[in-house]
């Protein structure tokens, strides 16, 4: 009986050991969404102009080690922000594919929308000025307002028909 | 040959300087003979530029390695077509192409039948000749295409393999035609201001030339995207690279002009704004060239670092300052006869918002492109501004743009009453919301995708209604058959309906972008021979790995059979090409394209035992991007085509006693 239990335990241990090795040997998918989230934050410096998610390991030795390091960090349970912080501490902001959303780099993100907002407000005031200038002196009736391009189209069709008849 | 080829450049330069001076003198003394002499000079410049092009083509095709340019960009085993296209692979060759197009456009204007007797011609010619002189100076003294080497090498360095693709034959040509084309509206604008005559003729001609330049710029960007998609092996088509941005910015501002000029036509307003847009578009083409050729920014497209960019920056500065001076000196003329708006809600207002968004998008691209330089200047850190930035900043702006595009056709000129709005928008809005709800039910649940597709549905409905109402109105009066009525409606209003076709094309492109950006899936797998890779509904059997030799290139390829839902749909052969004269290998992707999605397979790596690593991507709706691009071309051609109706250029109403 004891030997049966012993064999049973050995078998269980063997099965678990096998599955453990399977996990270790399982190929990591460098094109998974999780890896993309982490690796696409960093610019490859081999001159390919791509981030470490896109950079092809076949043509770039630099990205091979970088990818492996990221996988190692992910296996440790680091999320993309922690990985990002780690690399920024070592290489500075230059390694990122987009400026940080803090400090001076925040200007990069804000400026386009600030410019749009200011220009939008300016346009509003200009249009208001133009509309006011027009005022109420032109009493456009509702019928005139509703006269749209389709009606103009009808009119031009009529003119064309008449032209065909007489010319 | 050496003497002849170089003579074409220096004689061309001498003729350009002569023509510029003699035409300027002719304008100031109102002497037609001098103008005619200058025009003759333009023909001479055309001959020189053509001969220079033919000389370089000949040297490239016959592998004359004693010439530096031929050695740098070709090799003897290169197929003839790529030997010829190497003309625009390098700095000096591409600038020669640029010069040739500029001269070609100048001849077209100077000897145009429509422009005969028009006093604008000498002014336009002089402005374009100023540009031509600059380019010949560059070709003659900075980036010389015909430089002899001290020692003749046995073999050339070869052409970058990335450029050995059909897309690269046509992409630079179309892009340059677009870039150079924007000099024409600029010249028209300056000529109109100098003559103090900003009339309908100016608008018509400028708009026409802007559409032509815009079409070529669009084509250039589309071909570039298509090339990137099949050649670079990353499965994308637009990377927001500084050089891509350089061609996108003038495209945006030219688009803004094409819309705002309609307000000028209708209401005689926004003259200063329109001329500013023309100047900006032109300046951005020079700015783009500065970016590509100065090496201030890192780009995969950039030419070798040189001091060329500096010359372009100086030239751009001179031209912009000159243009602004002319603009300011005619301020009162432009300010005069400004109209008013009847209402806040009208087609005019929507065009203003359209301009705000387009110019805002252009500013966003510009800001992102130059921010590394700003950051370096301010705090000494050269940050990278890449795809995540541009996607985040541009997505809301361009989506808003799509919304304005969807809404605009149904807004009335002058004023849209509440009744009018209800009548026009109730059904399209309901249908768009219903479509969005349906998408959510069908599993499309990403917010950006649902909003984006919803706006696109709205755009399709409003544009369909425009065609429907137009045809209905015509048929009511004429009793024509539907197709005849549609044909006549469109050919009678080429610009309007051409514009709508372009809008629909843009919507298709947006569909492709939203679909491929939000719902792409990919995997990277290493498999043994005979094994398969499964991704979504696809099973790809890896059957063979082999090697072949083509010329001096070694090609490793895999043969794969593709099954979808268990049904065989074809075979693909992804390749890795190792060039005999280039260090970096390149990928030829295996591609199966359908309207729904692309299966995109890259052979990444392999081992001696046949085990290989593949990147497999499913890119949804990519085909719609190319269909949309095709529609843009069709729509633009339809709009500028000389039709039977309503395409008569208005009579020139400016000064008559000038020279022409």
Image (tube, coloured by chain):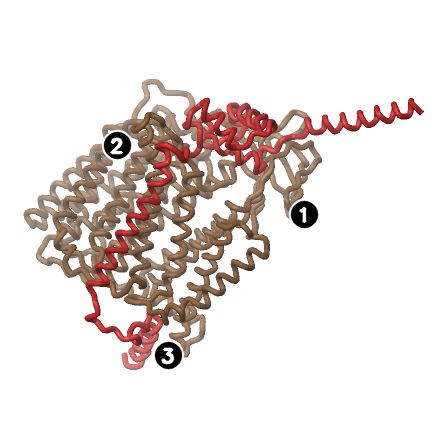
Image coordinates of residue B658 in percent, x first then y, are 9, 54
Q: Both on one chain, marks 3 and 1?
A: yes
Contact (Cβ within 8 Å) of mark 3 with mark 1? no
The residue lying furthest to the top in this view is: B151
Q: Which mark is residue B139?
A: 2
Q: Quarter of the image containing the N terminus of chain B?
A: top left
Image coordinates of residue A47 in percent, x first then y, are 44, 27
Image coordinates of residue B354 in percent, x first then y, are 33, 54
The foreground one among B331 and B66 is B331
| Mark toward the start of the polypeptide (3 vs 1) | 3
Q: CA distance from mark 3 to mark 1?
A: 54 Å
Q: Chain of mark 1?
A: B
Mark 2 surroundings: few (<14), some (14-19) or many (≥20) residues within 10 A: many
Chain letter, red in picture? A
The foreground one among B303 and B93 is B303
Chain letter, brown in picture? B
Q: Secondary structure at mark 2?
A: helix
Q: Can you identify the residue that label 3 sits on?
A: B477
Q: Can you identify the residue that label 1 sits on?
A: B568
Q: Secondary structure at mark 1?
A: strand
**B596 relative position to B637: left or right:** right
Q: Residue at x 40, y 69 (%)?
A: B422
The foreground one among B18 and B608 is B608
| Mark toward the start of the polypeptide (3 vs 2) | 2
């Amino acid at each position: 009986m004891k030997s049966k239990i012993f064999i049973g335990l050995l078998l269980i241990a063997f099965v678990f050991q096998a599955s453990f090795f399977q996990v270790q040997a399982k190929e990591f998918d460098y094109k998974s969404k999780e890896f993309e989230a982490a690796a696409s934050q960093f610019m490859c410096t081999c001159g390919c102009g791509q981030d470490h998610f896109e950079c092809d390991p076949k043509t770039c030795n630099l990205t091979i080690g970088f990818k492996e390091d990221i996988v190692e960090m992910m296996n440790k349970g680091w999320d993309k922000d922690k990985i990002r912080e780690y690399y920024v501490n070592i290489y500075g902001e230059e390694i990122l594919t987009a400026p940080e959303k803090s400090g001076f780099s925040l200007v990069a993100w804000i400026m386009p929308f600030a410019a749009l907002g200011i220009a939008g407000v300016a346009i509003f005031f200009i249009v208001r000025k133009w509309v006011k200038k027009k005022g109420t002196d032109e009493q456009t009736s509702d019928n005139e307002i509703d006269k749209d391009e389709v009606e103009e189209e009808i009119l031009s069709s009529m003119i064309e028909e008449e032209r065909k008849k007489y010319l | 040959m050496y003497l002849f080829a170089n003579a074409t450049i220096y004689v061309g330069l001498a003729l350009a300087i002569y023509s510029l001076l003699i035409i300027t003198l002719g304008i100031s003394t109102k002497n037609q003979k001098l103008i005619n002499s200058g025009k003759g000079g333009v023909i001479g410049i055309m001959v020189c530029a053509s001969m220079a092009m033919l000389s370089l083509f000949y040297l490239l095709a016959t592998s004359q390695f004693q010439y530096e340019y031929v050695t740098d960009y070709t090799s003897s085993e290169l197929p003839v077509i790529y030997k010829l296209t190497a003309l625009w692979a390098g700095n000096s060759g591409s600038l020669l192409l640029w010069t040739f197009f500029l001269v070609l456009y100048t001849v077209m204007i100077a000897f145009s039948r429509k422009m005969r007797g028009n006093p604008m011609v000498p002014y336009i010619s002089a402005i374009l000749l100023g540009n031509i002189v600059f380019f010949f100076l560059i070709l003659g003294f900075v980036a010389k295409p015909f430089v002899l080497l001290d020692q003749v090498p046995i073999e050339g360095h070869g052409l970058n393999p990335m450029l050995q693709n059909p897309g690269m034959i046509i992409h630079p040509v179309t892009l340059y035609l677009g870039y150079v084309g924007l000099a024409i509206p600029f010249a028209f604008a300056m000529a109109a201001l100098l003559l103090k005559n900003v009339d309908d003729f100016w608008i018509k001609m400028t708009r026409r030339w802007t559409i032509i330049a815009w079409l070529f710029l669009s084509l250039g960007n589309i071909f570039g995207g298509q090339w990137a998609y099949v050649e670079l092996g990353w499965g994308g088509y637009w990377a927001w690279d500084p050089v891509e941005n350089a061609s996108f910015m003038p495209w945006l501002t030219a688009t803004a002009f094409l819309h705002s000029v309609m307000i000028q036509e209708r209401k005689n307003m926004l003259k200063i704004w329109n001329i500013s847009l023309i100047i900006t578009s032109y300046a951005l083409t020079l700015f783009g060239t500065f970016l590509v050729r100065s090496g201030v920014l890192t780009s995969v497209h950039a030419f070798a670092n040189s001091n060329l960019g500096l010359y372009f920056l100086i030239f751009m500065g001179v031209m912009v300052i000159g243009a602004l001076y002319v603009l300011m000196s005619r301020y009162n003329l432009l300010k005069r006869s400004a109209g008013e708006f009847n209402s806040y809600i009208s087609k005019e207002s929507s065009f203003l918002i359209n301009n705000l968004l387009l110019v805002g998008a252009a500013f966003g691209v510009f800001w992102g492109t130059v921010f590394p330089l700003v950051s370096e200047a301010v705090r000494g850190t050269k940050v990278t501004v890449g795809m995540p930035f541009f996607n985040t900043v541009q997505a809301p702006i361009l989506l808003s743009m799509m919304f304005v595009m969807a809404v605009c056709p149904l807004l009335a000129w002058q004023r849209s009453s509440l009744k009018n709005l209800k009548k026009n928008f109730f059904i399209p809005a309901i249908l768009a919301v219903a479509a969005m709800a349906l998408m959510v039910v069908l599993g499309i649940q990403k917010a950006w995708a649902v909003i984006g597709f919803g706006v696109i549905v709205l755009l399709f409905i409003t544009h369909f209604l425009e065609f429907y109402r137009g045809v209905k109105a015509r048929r009511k009066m004429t009793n024509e058959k539907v197709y005849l009525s549609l044909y006549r409606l469109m050919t009678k209003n080429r610009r309007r309906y051409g514009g709508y076709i372009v809008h629909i094309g843009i919507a298709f492109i947006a569909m492709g972008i939203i679909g491929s950006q939000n719902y792409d899936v990919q995997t990277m797998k290493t498999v043994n021979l005979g094994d398969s890779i499964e991704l979504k509904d696809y099973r790809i059997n890896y059957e063979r790995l082999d090697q072949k030799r083509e010329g001096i290139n070694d090609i490793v390829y895999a043969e794969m059979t593709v099954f979808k839902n268990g049904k065989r749909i074809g075979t693909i052969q992804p390749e890795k090409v190792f060039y005999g004269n280039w260090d970096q290998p390149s990928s030829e992707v295996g591609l199966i394209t359908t309207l729904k999605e692309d299966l995109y397979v890259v052979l990444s790596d392999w081992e001696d035992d046949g085990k290989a690593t593949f990147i497999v991507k499913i890119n949804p709706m990519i085909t719609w991007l190319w269909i949309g691009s095709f529609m843009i071309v069709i729509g633009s051609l339809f709009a500028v085509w000389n039709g039977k109706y309503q395409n008569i250029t208005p009579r020139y109403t400016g000064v008559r006693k000038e020279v022409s």
